[in-house]
Every structure is written in C-alpha cells, then in structure tokens.
Image (tube, rainbow, N blue to C red):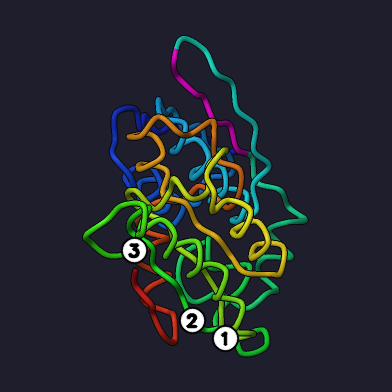
Amino acid sequence: MNAITLDCQGLACPGPVLRCMDCLEKQAPQGLTVLVNDPAALENVSRLLTGKGFSVSSLHELGIWTIRANRDASATAASAAAPAPAGGDACASVVPGAQGKRSTTVFITAETIGKGDEELGGKLMLNFLLTLPELGDKLWRIVLVNGGVKLACEGHPCLEKLVTLAESGVSVLVCGTCLGFFGLMEKKRVGETTNMLDVVTSLDVAGKVIQV
C-alpha cells in the first residue's frame, strides 16, 4: 500500500486542502497522513478525505493534529458509481438544480446589515434571516465569512434563525479561518466549517448570489 505524508503545518486556508487534492489526483495514495496545526484545517481536510472515500482518524498532540486516512474500498466503489458533483466537496451533498429548485446562495460578510447604526444593523440582519424562508425551494446555501461567522455562534441572537434554516435543508458554510481569527472555533453551533475553495465554488455554481 502506497502511503504518503504531507506536512501542512502553517499553511493558510485553503492550502492544506489544495495540497491534499493535488496529492490525491497525481499520486492516488491508498494511505495518507496529514499534519496540520489549525483546527479549521483539521475539519476541512478530514471532510475532504472522507468525501473521497477514506476512513479518517486524527490525533492531537502538542498543538499538532495528525490526520490518518486509509482508502475504504466500499466507500470508493460507491463514490465511483455516483456522478461527480460540480464544485468542491462541500457542494457534494446538494448541487444546485440536482434536488428540487435549490440554486440561490446567500453570501453574508458581516454581523449587521448596512452602515449608520450597529443596533439597527443587527435588527435588520435578524429580520433578513427571518425572511429568507420566503425564498422557498430556491434557497440552497448560506455562506458566512468575516464578521458573518458570529451569526453561527453560541449566544448570538441570529443563531436560532440559522439553525431553523439548516434544519429545513439549507446548507450553511462557516469560514474556518474567520472563526479562528475571532477565537470562535469552539463556539460554532450550526453549519459546516469550511475553506475558501468551498466558498469560491459555492458562489461559482450557484444560480444566483445574494450578498449582504
């Protein structure tokens, strides 16, 4: 069994994911060990490898996560039989147009809407999320970056609305780099921790993008 080790410590998002994708494409290893020192990279790399048909485990020691992945024959066969998704692995679960009419991505880059008054902006964001279900089956994905990731975290007034949307089938992606910057990685309560590759792919394959 060919096994490869990738040292991705210190690589900024989406560096670890891109290195893994390049390795899988060019060398097709049966086993892969990836070293990262960032919790967002841990989640993103683990999700990528799981989606590619690997059994994944991890060990945390002295600030370094060792991700060990071995190719799962049954999962690989199932993956090969399925049609390839358009875009990154975060898009694999629901591709726009593949299920119902879902095709609209909402790109949220801040905790509030508009400029002028923060309290008013917070109320507008809450009302915005409360109104999103009116899009019906057109709403596919919500992508949170920068201050927008705070909406998905414990204690935020908007968290309940995001949970409701996620439970209704809307995909929620939360930027891991942004969570780490604000020290909120452990406080995220809804959505998938993601990377810039998945963010770009989500915007690219969406039928329509609404940015706030």
Marks 2 and 1 close (CB-CB < 8 Å):
yes
Going from N to C along the chain, the mark reached first, 3 or 2, is 2
Secondary structure that dominates the magenta span: strand
In front of the other: label 3 or label 1? 3
Q: Is mark 1 on a helix, strand or loop?
A: helix
Pointers 3 and 1 in contact (CB under 8 A)?
no
Q: Residue, x 58% and y 68% (percent of image)?
A: 92
Q: Badge 3 is on which residue?
A: 113
Q: In which quarter of the image is the N terminus?
A: top right
Give 159 or 83, whichever is nearer the viewer: 159
| Residue 137 at x, y percent in the picture | 64, 85
Q: How crowded is mark 3: few (under 14 residues within 10 Å), some or many (20 or more)?
A: many
| Image spot of residue 163 (x, y percent) | 65, 56
Q: Is residue 41 magenta?
A: no
Disc 2: which residue: 104
Query: For this view, does 95 lie left or right of residue 122?
Result: right
In the current view of this chain or complex, which residue is farthest to the top?
Answer: 62
Residue 67 forms part of the magenta stretch: yes
Element marked by disc 3: loop
Residue that numbered label 1 is attached to: 138
Label for residue 122? none
